[in-house]
Image (cartoon, grey):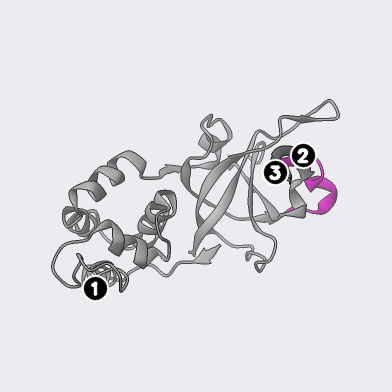
């Protein structure tokens, strides 16, 4: 999980994104008015993870106007434009996310996190791979063993969605935050009780 500081203006965004890529990207040049996939990946601090690239782009351009953002998109390579059209994150509220059926989709969500204690966390499980020689199986383990877990409530406070980030990261502040993450599946049932169906794994966030 990484905190994002959004660009203040178009000039700053163009300078950071039109960066020439990493040293081995010999076919891309900085400040040439074109933004290639390698440059976007370098700015996002990843190599080829499309979901993280577009989550980064959505959050880092939060303060730009629609026209400023489209100015940047117009500089994308053709493959990058297609990737943005096909893979850009969905912006959802909690009510929409509660009923969202697709898993492993990039999502942007806003809300105030409420830390969940371990007694409650034990009611939600994730599937973890266990390898024995050449055989890989999956076990249900409590989500708190791998993540710090929070709830975000709907405005009416009658429904919640779980969000989580790696257990070795600092606790999120109790204030309104914009999250960029990937919707992941939880184990369906454990000991006959119905479980939450999914949770949002936080990759990036912006404090409002």
Q: Residue beneath label 2, please? A: 140
**Mark 2, secondary structure of its residue:** strand
Residue at 36% from the left image edge and 59% from the top image edge: 62
Nearest the camera: 62 or 137? 137
Nearest the camera: 208 or 2? 2
- Mark 1 or mark 3, which is nearer the start of the sequence? 1
Q: Residues within 10 Å of mark 1 (few under 14, many from 20)?
A: few
Q: Residues within 10 Å of mark 2 (few under 14, many from 20)?
A: some
Nearest the camera: 97 or 191? 191
- The N terminus, quarter of image: bottom right
Residue 15 circle label: 1
- Residue 133 appears at what percent x and percent y? 73, 44
Pair 2/3: label in front: 3
**52 shown above or below 208:** above
Residue at 33% from the left image edge and 63% from the top image edge: 63
Distance in Å between CA atoms under marks 2 and 3? 9 Å
Is residue 128 toward the left or the right of residue 193 in the image?
left
- Residue 139 appears at what percent x and percent y? 77, 39
The answer to if 57 sits in the magenta stretch is no
Distance in Å between CA atoms under marks 1 and 2? 45 Å
Is residue 145 toward the left or the right of residue 61 in the image?
right
Q: Which residues are magenta?
A: 115-126
Circles 1 and 2, Cβ within 8 Å, touching? The answer is no
The answer to if 125 sits in the magenta stretch is yes
């Amino acid at each position: 999980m990484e905190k994002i500081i959004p660009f203040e203006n178009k000039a700053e965004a163009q300078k950071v994104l039109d960066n020439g890529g990493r040293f081995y990207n010999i076919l891309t040049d900085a400040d040439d008015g074109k933004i290639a996939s390698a440059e976007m990946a370098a700015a996002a601090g990843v190599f080829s993870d499309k979901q993280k690239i577009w989550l980064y782009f959505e959050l880092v351009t939060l303060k730009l106007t629609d026209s400023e953002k489209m100015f940047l998109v117009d500089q994308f390579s053709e493959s990058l434009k297609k990737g943005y059209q096909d893979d850009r994150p969905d912006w959802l509220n909690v009510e929409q996310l509660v009923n969202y059926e697709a898993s492993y989709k990039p999502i942007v969500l806003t809300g105030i996190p409420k830390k969940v204690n371990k007694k409650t966390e034990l009611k939600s499980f994730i599937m973890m791979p266990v390898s024995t020689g050449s055989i890989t199986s999956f076990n249900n383990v409590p989500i708190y063993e791998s993540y710090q877990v929070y709830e975000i409530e709907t405005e009416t406070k009658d429904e919640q969605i779980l969000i989580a980030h790696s257990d070795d990261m600092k606790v999120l502040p109790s204030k309104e935050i914009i999250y960029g993450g990937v919707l992941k599946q939880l184990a369906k049932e454990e000991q006959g009780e119905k479980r939450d169906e999914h949770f949002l794994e936080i990759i990036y966030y912006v404090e409002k």
